[in-house]
Amino acid sequence: MAARGLRLGVGRLSEVPAALRGVGRASSSSQAFAEVLRLPRRQLTKLVYPLQELEQYLAPDARADLRPRIFHPSLEDISKAESFFASGARNRVEYVSSAVRLDHAPDLRRPEGHTKKMNFFKVGKYFTMVDMPGYGYRAPEDFVDMVEAYLKERRNLKRTFLLVDSAVGITKLDNIAIEMCEEFALPYVMVLTKIDKSSRGHLLKQVLQIQRFVNMQTQGCFPQLFPVSAMTHSGIHLLKCFIANITGNLDLTVPSLAEDSKFFIPTGLAH
């Protein structure tokens, strides 16, 4: 895959093209996940399946809105997915280059400062992730030429990820990114960041509001949200498994409910 990533508005759009197949941090190796599997059941659920853990605090009539098990791989599948994201002698996860437009890719050692360019990260031989600049007030002047052209023209794009601050919710700037994805008919995913920053009550409120927005006002958004925390690593393992699956690198041992859901957007639409 040539996973391309970008940040729109307050959130970040991380795109995943077709040629790709897997990404992550060395700290999230298969060996590290083996330690996760030794956690008590409740701790494990909270770490790996954060939406499912939140589900228990909802009234029965609200649980149907949450959709926590549309993509619900087994722990075995999640463990397999970790291998794609672990950096090692045979599988290097590394920064490749930056580009201000599709035909301009300077050889830079590392991204510097706020993201002003499209930064490409290669995940072994499997796929590439692209981190794109934000859509907000810090957006570069050539944002439209850079980002919109990329989203329109990149035929091997697998999925676009919109990063939304779970403490703030969907902002006007996020709506610009959502409208862009909808207009271009791009399959995209909502990733809710910083879930460790909110109380359980506030997080539940934000998750339900965003989920209802996705259910009622979007066509191309994957119906299940992915709450994550970079600090506690909650939800990260599940998200990586999702990426490994949609890029064609991991066939689930037990088919996900997503395959039978009328709301599921086939990855082929991203080609």
Image (cartoon, rainbow, N blue to C red):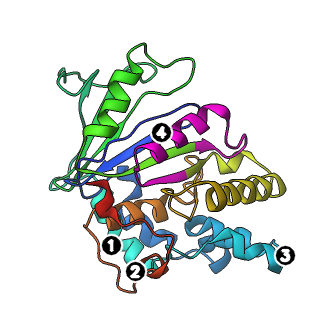
> Split into 4 quadrants, where in the image is the C terminus?
bottom left
Indicate whether residue 22 is drawn in magenta.
no
Image position of 139 (left or right of 118)? right
Give the secondary structure at mark 4. helix
Q: Earlier in the sequence, mark 4 or mark 3?
A: 3
* Mark 2–mark 3 distance (CA, rounded to whole Å): 30 Å
Image position of 270 (left or right of 178)? left
Image position of 239 (left or right of 253)? right
Q: Quadrant of residue 39?
A: bottom right
Q: Which residue is mark 2?
A: 76
Give the secondary structure at mark 2. helix
* Residue drawn at point x = 49 percent, y = 28 percent: 134
Dots 2, 1 in contact, CB < 8 A = yes
Q: Which residue is mark 4?
A: 180
* Residue drawn at point x = 40 percent, y = 50 percent: 186
Q: Which of the two residues, 1 or 77, is positioned nearer the viewer here?
A: 1
* Mark 4–mark 3 distance (CA, rounded to whole Å): 34 Å
Placement of 35 over or under 124, stated as above or below: below
4 vs 3, front mark: 4
Image position of 105 (left or right of 29)? left
**Amino acid type, label 4:** Met
Give the secondary structure at mark 3. loop
Give the secondary structure at mark 1. helix
Q: Position of residue 221 (x, y in %)?
A: 51, 56
Q: Which of the two residues, 218 or 120, is positioned nearer the viewer here?
A: 218
* Mark 1–mark 3 distance (CA, rounded to whole Å): 34 Å
Q: Which residue is mark 3?
A: 59
1 vs 4, front mark: 4
**Amino acid type, label 3:** Ala
* Mark 1–mark 4 distance (CA, rounded to whole Å): 34 Å
Visible residue check, residue 112: yes
Indicate which disc residue 80 carries. Answer: 1
